[in-house]
Amino acid sequence: VKMLDLSNCLNDDRLAQLTALEGLEYLQTNLAQVTDEGVKPLARLKNLKTLKFFHPGKSFSGAGLAHLAELPNMRSVTVAGSLAFNDDGMAAVAKLTGLTEFRTWHAGWTEEGVRKLKALKNLKSLYLGQRLTYEPPACPTDETIGVVAELKSLESLQLDEARLTYGALQRLKQLPALKKLTLGGIDIPKEEVERLTRELPQVKVEWTQPTEAQQKRIRALFGSD
């Protein structure tokens, strides 16, 4: 078995049983009720390349991902749908220095957590979606762009559910390898997107206006204007 997708059935004991699958390369979970310590057995899966946690339980802050720092083939991590995944989790992700892709949205991290990602010198693809909250602090914000602009290896960047400005986004010119920029549900005037597209001629810029559900979160986090 090289790929496994499990939903609403994992706890620490069952996760530990997966270590018998020595050839496992891809593990996707949904609604896993695991703890940070419970993630530790995954360090035995030396072939693991991709790990995804969707809607993990409240006992998973992400800090346990640090146990996987020595995995030689780990390249992609996704954590989404849990406010419990916080800045400690982001710090743990930053220890997975072989990562080329990291995706997270509707979680609990802040700008401080995003700063931890500067340790990922091989990161090529980054997806940051809005925090799982209707109360400040928001993240991503314009401030986030300044941090992301320091990730010089990035080739693809996606930002979701935020109010961003041209003044901040134009800082992405500092990313020499950037090829694709996706602005999903971003509150920004169309004219500023067009201006940004001209400013980044080597980058494919894709923008979608916020849905009403996204606007509700954006207004709660950034204000009504």
Image (cartoon, rainbow, N blue to C red):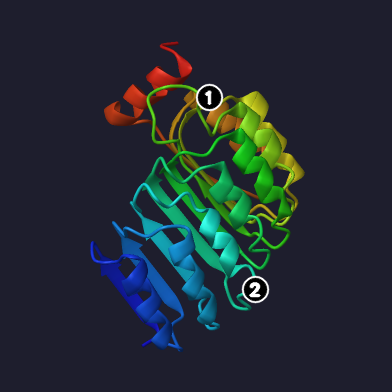
Question: Of helix, strand and loop, which one carries label 1?
Answer: helix
- State the image coordinates of residue 203 (x, y, percent, origin top left): 62, 49
Pointer 1 local density, CA inside 10 Å: few below 14, some 14–19, many at least 20: few
Q: Which residue is mark 2?
A: 70
Q: Quadrant of residue 68?
A: bottom right
- Give residue 115's position: percent from left, percent from top: 67, 41
**In the visual, does 189 lie left or right of 118?**
left
- The image position of residue 220, as x and y in percent, is 39, 19
Amino acid under disc 2: Glu
Who's the residue at 63% across and 67% down the image? 69
Q: What is the quadrant of the N terminus in the image? A: bottom left
Residue flagged by tag 1: what amino acid is it? Glu
Of residues 199 and 210, the one drawn nearer to the viewer in this rendering: 210
Q: Nearer the viewer, residue 225 or 90?
A: 90
| Mark 2 or 1: the one toward you | 2
User: Residue 132, located in which quarter of the rendered image?
Assistant: top left
Residue 204 appearing in the image: no
- Could you say which disc has been placed on residue 168 in the image? none
| 122 in relation to 115, above or below | below
Residue position for label 1:
191
- CA separation, marks 2 and 1? 46 Å
Q: Can residue 59 be seen at all in this image of the molecule?
A: yes
Residue at 36% across, 67% down: 12
Split into 4 quadrants, where in the image is the C terminus? top left
User: Residue at (52%, 81%) from the top-left corner?
Assistant: 44
* Lower sequence index among marks 2 and 1: 2
